[in-house]
Each structure stands twice: as C-alpha cells, then as structure tokens.
Image (cartoon, helix red, strand yellow):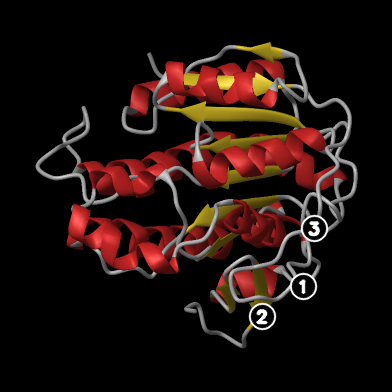
Amino acid sequence: MPAMERIGGLSACQVMIGRSQNGMVASITEKSLPRQDGRVFTVTGESSGIGYELSKILYGAGGTVYVLTRTQSNAKEAIKSIKKLFDDISHPTGDLGRLEFIHKAAKEFCSRESSLLALFNNAGVAAVKDTATKQGLEYNYGVNSVGHVLLETLLLPTMTTTAKLAPANSVRAVWTASILDADLNYSTSKAGVWFAASEFSKRHGRETGVLSIAGNPGSYVTNIWRTTPGWLYWLYRPLFCQPIHGAYTNLWMAFSEEVDMDGAVTGGMRFRMGDGIPDNGKICC
C-alpha cells in the first residue's frame, strides 16, 4: 500500500557538521539550518537515501514534514528510525507511479494544511525496464517526471498562498535532477526534470512567487541503484558518497539566499555534490 506520512516537528537534532563530496564544507547542514517551527514541507521518496536524510533534518529542525512514498511498509520503517529521536505520526496515502493516488495525497494534504514552504520532488527510479505506469506511461518517465509535475501542479495553489505571506523567493519547489547517462529512459526522465523545474518558474514563478529549481546532488549509496545492472553499480561504486551530502544540496536549493527567481527562470544555476553555487547560466556539474 503506497503511503504519504506526516511527521510533526519537535526538538532540534544535534549532529556534527559534514563535508560535501568534493571536500568543501557544505554551507547549510543540520548544524546550521535555522529552526523551522511552524513551517510545512513535503518530501517525496522519504523511505531511504537522500529523502530520508532530508526529512530527518527538516523534522529535527522543528518543521512539519509530509513524506510521500510508493510503499507504506518502507515508509513506516523510515519513520520508526526517525522516531528513535522524535515522535508524532499520521498516515495519508500516495504513489508517484499512479496519478489517482497523487490526486488523493494532494487533496488530503490540502485538507490538513493551509501552507507549504517547500516541496522536495526527490523520489526517483532508475533503469526500470519494460514497465509502464497504470496510465501507460514509461515507468521512469512517469515516476521521475510526470508524477512530480502533477504533484506540484496540485500543491501550487497552497504554495502560492504561502508565498504571499512569506519573504520573496523563500517558497520553493526543489527538484532532484541528474546528469548521469546510465540508461536512456532514466536520462530522458531526468532531462524532463530539468525542463519541468525551469518551466514552472518561467510560467508561474513571478505570478505566484513560487520558485522552482532543479539540481544534480551527485552520486550516492541509495536504493535507486537496485534496478540498475550490477556491473553499472560496481563501476560507479568507488565514486559514491553517503546520501546525507545529497540532502545538503537540497537544503542549499531550498534555503540559500543565493538562489533567486531570475536564476530559476533561466536555469542559471549549477550544483556541486553536497552544496550549490551560482554559475551564470550553466545547469551542469
């Protein structure tokens, strides 16, 4: 059963500051992130990897975090792990591979919350072969691109309302993209992520005040590799780092004052592993 879980924030999580994959200290981590009490976030793909680390940081900083996953059992295990530090959980439903579940999850979210500071379009699959979504879409494309486009579209009115009361450029949709050419369908779906984020900002950004931006967090030891060929995983494995550093990239995209609407509209940002820096119009590492 797919699941969207809500975690209500409590006390801050005290963890030593980490370093990015390139050896530089990440500028926004669980150590430096300000308190997020009263702020609402949604993270897709929370049950493991970058999404799990990101949810834990936001929740530990006092935020209310809604997490959307395809498998309820995986979500419960992740929540159980987080509950070793914190508690307070409830259970909506959702699945990025099935558009009807996205509608249901968004409707339930909007019935519970009237604000949303940041949507993290993080969930993803890779190299899933000969499989389609219920709507007949190629599976990588359906989950990585189309599902998130629908989710952001449905949550955009709530984010727009939030943006009217928040500082400029502070309400954001953060998309986890990639530059890895591991599989044609995967690469195509992630190209769609770059375009989707840019198009949301171009078409709706200045009107709504919601900034949508994509970034490549780097390569990490996560479950996304479970559907890729074994030889590919072991070829890249020496280059992988722990997913906490990918969470730092997402935190930078969500909270850095260096990110602005002009950069989001033009796609004028690039991102390094574990952090991000502006780069005059380039969107690759």
Q: Nearer the viewer, residue 142 or 23?
A: 23
Q: For the residues marked 2 and 3, what is the alpha-carbon distance in whole angstroms?
A: 22 Å
Q: Are marks 1 and 2 in contact (CB under 8 Å)?
A: yes
Please tell me which residue is depicted at 65% across the width and 75% down the height of the picture: 23
Residue assigned mark 3: 17
Residue 160 rendering spot, x and y as whole percentages:
70, 43
Q: Position of residue 33 (x, y in %)?
A: 84, 52
| Sooner in the amino-acid sequence: mark 2 or mark 3 | 3
The residue most toward the left is 130
Gap in angstroms between the C-alphas marked 3 and 1: 21 Å
Q: Which mark is residue 150?
A: none
Task: Work out whether 27 lies above or below 48.
Answer: below
The three-letter code of the residue at mark 2 reads Pro
Q: Which mark is residue 258?
A: 1
Q: Secondary structure at mark 1?
A: loop
Tell me the kind of residue under disc 1: Glu
Badge 3 or badge 1: first in the primary sequence: 3
Q: Residue at x 68, y 41 (%)?
A: 159
Asked whether residue 97 is in view, the answer is yes
Tell me the kind of residue under disc 3: Ile
Camera-near label (2 vs 3) is 3
Residue at the disc numbered 2:
278
Q: Nearer the viewer, residue 234 or 173?
A: 234
Q: Secondary structure at mark 2?
A: strand
Say if 139 sits above or below 285 in the image.
above
Quadrant where the N terminus sits is top left
* Residue, far bottom: 280
